[in-house]
Image (tube, rainbow, N blue to C red):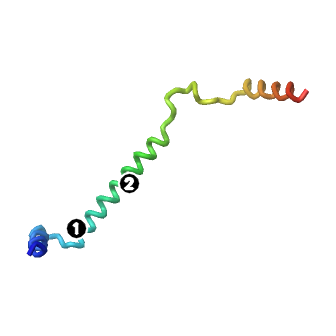
């Protein structure tokens, strides 16, 4: 009896069972895409403190070359 009631309520809205399943699947896919976008946004953030990011400059490279020379001499 309950199954008939559900079918009657679906037909009252004008949507078939396949249409309802398709809508639910599309909503799930949309939610998964949103989660993926949030993960990508968090992964691609630039660090807020630039001091902690090592930057290779010519002076640093020159100092490293001198240190290597001193170690091998």
The number of numbered discs placed on residues in the rendered structure image is 2
Residue 53: which quarter of the image?
A: top right
26 sits left or right of 7 in the view = right
Give residue 48's position: percent from left, percent from top.
Answer: 49, 29
33 sits left or right of 43 in the view = left
Residue shown at the point (38%, 54%) measured from the top left: 33
Give residue 43's position: percent from left, percent from top.
Answer: 48, 42
Residue shown at the point (63%, 30%) measured from the top left: 54
Q: Which residue is mark 1?
A: 20
34 sits left or right of 13 in the view = right
Q: Secondary structure at mark 1?
A: helix
Residue 66: which quarter of the image?
A: top right
Give residue 18's position: percent from left, percent from top.
Answer: 24, 73
Q: In the picture shown, does residue 5 fall above or below 34?
A: below
Q: Residues within 10 Å of mark 2 (few under 14, many from 20)?
A: few
Residue shown at the point (48%, 38%) measured from the top left: 45
Q: In the picture shown, does residue 45 fall above or below 36?
A: above
Q: Earlier in the sequence, mark 1 or mark 2?
A: 1
Q: Secondary structure at mark 2?
A: helix
Q: In the picture shown, does residue 3 fall above or below 59?
A: below
The outermost residue toward the front is: 1
Q: Which residue is mark 2?
A: 33
Give residue 24's position: percent from left, percent from top.
Answer: 26, 63
Residue shown at the point (22%, 67%) measured from the top left: 20
CA gap, disc 1 and disc 2: 20 Å
Q: Residues within 10 Å of mark 1 (few under 14, many from 20)?
A: few
Residue 52: which quarter of the image?
A: top right
Q: Quadrant of the C terminus?
A: top right
């Amino acid at each position: 009896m309950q199954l008939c009631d559900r079918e009657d309520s679906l037909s009252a809205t004008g949507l078939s069972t396949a249409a309802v399943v398709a809508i639910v699947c599309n909503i799930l896919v949309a939610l998964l895409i949103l989660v993926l976008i949030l993960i990508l946004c968090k992964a691609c953030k630039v660090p807020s403190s630039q001091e902690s990011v090592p930057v290779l400059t010519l002076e640093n490279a020159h100092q490293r070359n001198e240190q290597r020379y001193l170690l091998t001499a």
